[in-house]
Amino acid sequence: MRSASGFSLIELLVGVVLLGVLMAIGIPAFTDGLRNARVRTVASSVLQGLQLTRAEAVRRNTTVRFQFVTTLANNCAPSAAGPNWVVSLDDATGRCAAAASDTVAPRLIQARSGAEGSAFTTLAAGQPAFVFNSRGRLTTPPALIDLSANAGEACVDAGGRVRCLRIVVTAGGQIRMCDPALPAGDTQACT
């Protein structure tokens, strides 16, 4: 008698069912992780832009502005919803496509497209521009920048599944990313 090698139909079906169950369990967690990573990527980009602005203000011993804009073309306008941003010495409104320069207005230092981080993230800032003076202090009112997934999905603190983040910019120039869903006392909490 010869023994057959390979899988029987029943063994193959059991394997397919197990794979299906594992996929059904894993895909929602994977998509949540992907959404959270997109929000974190955009938050990190904005945080780094604000930190660059503050550092350049101190280094150059002058005021430097971080500005959210609608587009990086020359028809750009300030927008508290971003998603793009520029760092410049002068107001970049209508001149966001200018080359980086220390002499030609708007004396652009850096520009970033919101699509670089994620086009699937919503940004809501308290104001469209943040200006730092030569001592690294904010000359505009302090503000919050909230970041969340833009598919109308609720944040964890509102009972949803997306880990939304917040960037806090204080009058003293402190720039901090925090999680509004974490309880008070946690080092990453917003309180």
Image (spheres, grey):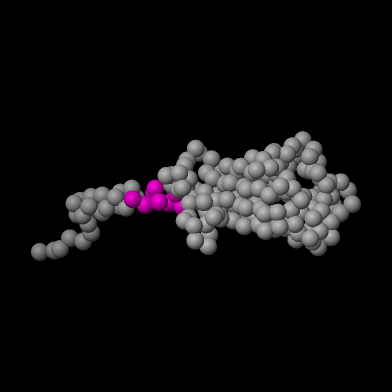
Position in image of residue 94 (x %, y %):
80, 38
Q: In this view, does 72 lie above or below 139?
A: above
Q: Is residue 102 above or below residue 127?
A: below
Looking at the picture, does residue 20 appear above or below residue 188?
Answer: above
Which quarter of the rendered picture does the N terminus lie within?
Answer: bottom left
Which residue is depicted at the point 30% across and 49% down?
A: 20
Report the quarter where the C terminus lies: bottom right
Side (left or right) of 107 relative to 153: right
Give yes or no for residue 32 being in the magenta stretch.
Answer: yes
Residue 53 in the image: x percent, y percent? 74, 55
Determine the main secondary structure of the stretch shown in magenta: helix
Q: Residue at x 49, y 61 (%)?
A: 185
How far from the left and from the top, in percent, is residue 123?
A: 60, 43
Residue 132 visible: yes
User: Magenta part of the protein: which range?
Assistant: 25-33
Residue 87 visible in image: no
The reply, left or right, for residue 187 in relation to residue 17 is: right
